[in-house]
Amino acid sequence: MPATGPASGGERVLAVSVPLFAAASSHYASAASPHAPRLVTLDEAFAGVDDDSRAKCLGLLHAFDLDVVMTSEREWACYPQVPGVAIAQLSRVDEIAAVLVTRWEWDGTALARGTDPRADAPPTAVDGGLDEGLWA
């Protein structure tokens, strides 16, 4: 698959992404600790790529054992090739100075609404008051 020329935009994205993912995995393999993060951040990385190719590419990220943070307007990575993913859906309404964060979790077979990770945690003191989140 050529990285330039008559290939589609999606084909070019895949032709360039796969070697980059392999290089990142190889680089992280040299970390002193086996528990070191193997972070890759992607911003709209798969725009223009068909669903089957996205699934394969996301499965490849799992095969390379990379920790991925990804932004996308529509990609939730809910494919059988992806064994698990945490999703934070951000929503906003004009004229309201806030962003709603809805958590979702994919376990490789089903998508479910996530729970607030702070639900079981006791309140913590911040600047003499209770931590009420981002807008406190």
Image (spheres, rainbow, N blue to C red):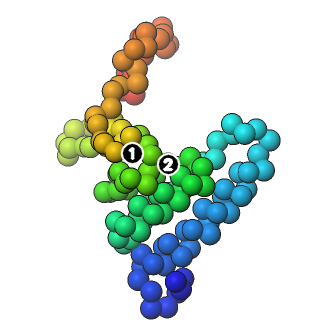
Q: Is residue 98 visible?
A: no
Q: Residue at x 37, y 54 (%)?
A: 79
**Camera-nearest residue between 84 and 44:** 84
Q: Is residue 135 above or below residue 124?
A: below
Q: Is residue 127 above or below residue 51?
A: above
55 or 46, which is in the foreground?
55
- Dot 2 crowding, Cα within 10 Å, few <14, some 14–19, many 20+: few
Label 1's element? loop
Q: Where, by quadrant of the figure, is residue 117 drawn?
A: top left
**Where is residue 62 drawn, in percent x and y?**
53, 52
Contact check, label 1 and label 2, Cβ < 8 Å: no
Image location of residue 126, percent across then percent down: 49, 14
* Tag of residue 62: none
Q: Secondary structure at mark 2?
A: strand
Horizontal relation, residue 9 to residue 98: left or right: right
Q: Quadrant of the C terminus?
A: top left
* Residue that carries the numbered disc 2 in the rendered image: 69
Q: Is residue 114 left or right of 5 when viewed as pictured? A: left
Image x and y of residue 63, in percent: 57, 55
**Residue hosting label 1:** 108
Amino acid type shown at disc 1: Gly
Q: How far separated are the C-alphas under marks 1 and 2?
A: 17 Å
Q: Nearer the viewer, residue 107 or 30?
A: 107
Is residue 84 shown above or below 46?
Answer: above
